[in-house]
Image (cartoon, rainbow, N blue to C red):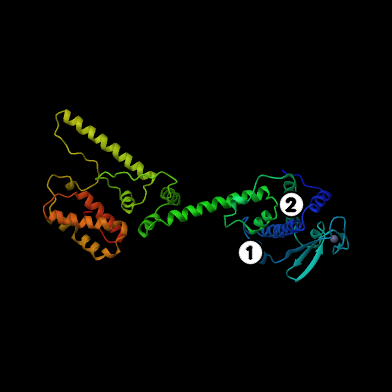
Amino acid sequence: MVQPLSKSEVHQLMSLLSDEQKTFIERYSKQSKKSKWIEAIARRKGMVLSEDTPYEEIEPLIEDWILVDIMDSGYGNRDYVCECGRALRYQYRVLHKKEGKVYGYGSSCFEHHTNLSPEVVKDIKSGFHSVDLERDEILITYFRGTDWSLEPYLHVDTIPSEFRKQHRLELPLTVRQRSKVIRLAEAYKQKKLWNKGFGQLDDYQKEIFFTIEKDEQWEIIRKITQLEENDYPELPAEFQDEEVLRFYSAGLPLLERHMEFLEDYRLQQIQSEKRTLIKRGAGGLPKRFQYRTGLDPSIHSSTRLDYQTLIERHLETLRSVRENEHRIPEGLKKDWIKVQQQVRDLKKELNIDYSNFKVLVNNLCYALQVERDEFL
Ligand SMILES: [Zn+2]
C-alpha cells in the first residue's frame, strides 16, 4: 500500500513534471473527486452503481448538491475564501441544484453548510482520500520507474481514453487502473473468440446453439475455434439420442456430455455382447443384441421392411419434407438425398438401414419444424 505523501512532497514531485503531465494529473484528480462526490450521494440514495457507470449518467439523478469544481491556489497560498470567511488553498465549488446557485466551501466546511448527512460527508472524504492516494501512487511510480506498460493492450478498444493519454504522457498507470486494463483485455479476448466462433455457424447450427446453456455454448465456441480438442467420433448406426444426432447431423462438435452418452452406450453394447456370448455358451438360442430400449421392436424383427410398409408409415412425413425441401439447411441437403435414395432402393427390393433412415428423417423434420409420424 502506498503511503500518502505530505503536501510539500506532492508539491516537490509535481514541480518536476512537465506542464502537460502536471495538468493531466490535476485534471484527473479533479474529475475523480467529482465522481466520488456523486457516487457517495447516489449510494446514500440507494442507487446501484457499477464501477463503470459514467459520471454523466448519475449526475442528472442527483437533485441536491453537486461538486462542480475544485479551485487550488497552489502550494503555500490561500487565495480563496469559504462562505464562512476562512481563507482557503482549496475551494470546493458546490452547486445547489434546487436554488441553481454555486457556493464555495473549504473541505472541512461543506459538512456544516450543506444539508448532506455526516455519513455522506464521511463517504465523500474517504473517496477524496483514495483519489489523493492514487495521485501519490502515480507520482511515486513515475519517479521510481516501472516495467509495466500499456503498450501490449493498446489494441483493446475498450481501454478508456484517459488511460491512453496517461500512457502517452509517460505517466504510469496505478495498480487499480492496471487491473482494470487486464480485466478489459480479457473481456475483449473473450468477445473476439465468441465472434470468431459464432461467425462460423450457419443458420441451422445457430438454431441448435441457442437451445443450450451459456456454458455449453462456450464449449462449442472453444471447440469450433480449436481452443479445445474437437473430435467427431463415429456414431454407432443404431445410436438414438435425439440431441446428439441433431448436433452430429448439423456438423456441430459434440459436447462433453454427449461424449459421455456415447461412452455409456458403447459400454452397454459390450455388456450386452458379453451376455449373449454367455447365453450361447450355456446352450441358449443365439439372441440378437438389444442395445436400444424403448424402440419399435419390429425394426429388429427378421421380417424385412418392405417398400409398402415404409410408405404406409411415413408417406405423410416424407410429403411434408418434400413440400419444404427449399428450406432444408445446407448441412442436411445430402441427408435428404440419401433418404430419397433409400426409398428408391427399397422399391427395388434392396436392403436399407431403417434406423438410419429414421434418424435422417427425424433430423429433417426437426430442422423444418414439420410434424413427425408416430413411427419415427
Ligand atoms: Zn467555512
- Whether disc 1's CB lies below 8 Å from ligand 1 is answered no
Residue 183 is situated, as x and y percent measured from the top left of the image, at 58, 50
Q: Is residue 373 visible?
A: no
How crowded pointer 2 is (Cα within 10 Å; few <14, some 14-19, many 20+) is rated as many
The amino acid beneath tag 2 is Arg
Secondary structure beneath disc 2?
Answer: helix
How crowded pointer 1 is (Cα within 10 Å; few <14, some 14-19, many 20+) is rated as few
Residue pictured at 38% horizontal, 45% vertical: 230
Q: Which mark is residue 57?
A: 1
Secondary structure beneath disc 1?
Answer: helix
Between marks 2 and 1, how big is the CA–CA gap? 25 Å
How many discs appear? 2
Q: Is residue 183 visible?
A: yes
Q: Name the residue nearer the viewer: 30 or 108.
A: 30
Q: Which mark is residue 327?
A: none
Quadrant containing the C terminus is bottom left
Residue pictured at 24% horizontal, 66% vertical: 323
Quadrant containing the N terminus is top right
Residue 65 is situated, as x and y percent measured from the top left of the image, at 74, 64
Locate ligand 1 by image quadrant. Answer: bottom right
Would you name the residue on which mark 2 appears? 135
Residue 365 is situated, as x and y percent measured from the top left of the image, at 27, 58
- Find the residue positioned furthest to the bottom: 100
Residue pictured at 60% horizontal, 54% vertical: 154
Residue pictured at 65% horizontal, 55% vertical: 163
Q: Which picture quadrant has residue 271? A: top left
Residue 282 is situated, as x and y percent measured from the top left of the image, at 16, 28
The amino acid beneath tag 1 is Glu
Q: Name the residue nearer the viewer: 174 or 271.
A: 174
- Find the residue positioned furthest to the top: 282
